Image (spheres, rainbow, N blue to C red):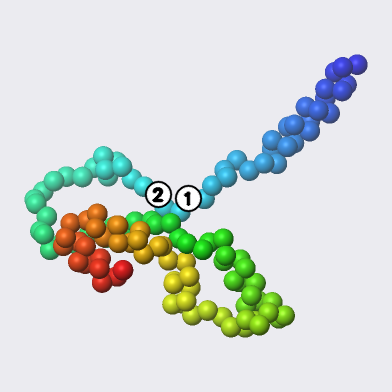
Amino acid sequence: MRIIHAIPAALSLASAALASPLFTHVLHEKRHRANDLEWTKVTRLTPELRIPVGIALTQTNLDKGHDWLMEVSDPRSVNYGKHWTPEELIDAFKPRSDTLHYLAESFTPRCSRMLGSTI
């Protein structure tokens, strides 16, 4: 008798497990370890060579994004149809200025001068 009650429970657990996604994250970029790329040192790099480096910073006001979107999307809002310019979007979500300055100070003086034009 207990087996009869256990079968539906087991079936419901199995169906719930199969219905849930196997992967719950999105891969935005793939990282390679240096030894995976099989680098070979040929000569010293020239100091003028620029190597692009991406640094991810925490954005601000992400919690307000939905509300701002609804303000320009709702016909009852006074801001309806007043879409933001790319500059306004960048200003609204850019990292805090003290974070940017800390980052610039963390690099060598030459790098800080180069970053200073973009901060």
Q: Residue at x 73, y 37 (%)?
A: 16
Question: Observer-nearest residue: 6 or 65?
Answer: 65
User: x%, y% of residue 70?
Assistant: 65, 72
Disc 2 crowd, CA 10 A, few/some/many (<14, 14-19, 20+): few
Q: Residue extending furthest front?
A: 98
Question: Observer-nearest residue: 22 or 80?
Answer: 80
Q: Which mark is residue 1?
A: none
User: x%, y% of residue 24?
Assistant: 57, 45
**Label 1 element class:** loop
Q: Residue at x 79, y 33 (%)?
A: 12
Q: Which mark is residue 27?
A: 1
Question: Observer-nearest residue: 40 or 51?
Answer: 51
Q: CA gap, disc 2 to disc 1? A: 7 Å
Label 2 belongs to which residue? 30
Q: Quadrant of the C terminus?
A: bottom left
Q: Could you tell me if the residues under marks 2 and 1 are in contact, i.e. CB atoms within 8 Å?
A: yes
Residue 32 placement, left or right of 14: left
Q: Is residue 62 above or below residue 85?
A: above
User: x%, y% of residue 87?
Assistant: 44, 77
Label 2 is placed on what type of residue? Lys
Disc 1 crowd, CA 10 A, few/some/many (<14, 14-19, 20+): few
Q: Quadrant of the N terminus?
A: top right
**Label 2 element class:** loop
- Which quadrant holds residue 40? top left
- Which quadrant holds residue 3? top right
- Which quadrant holds residue 20? top right
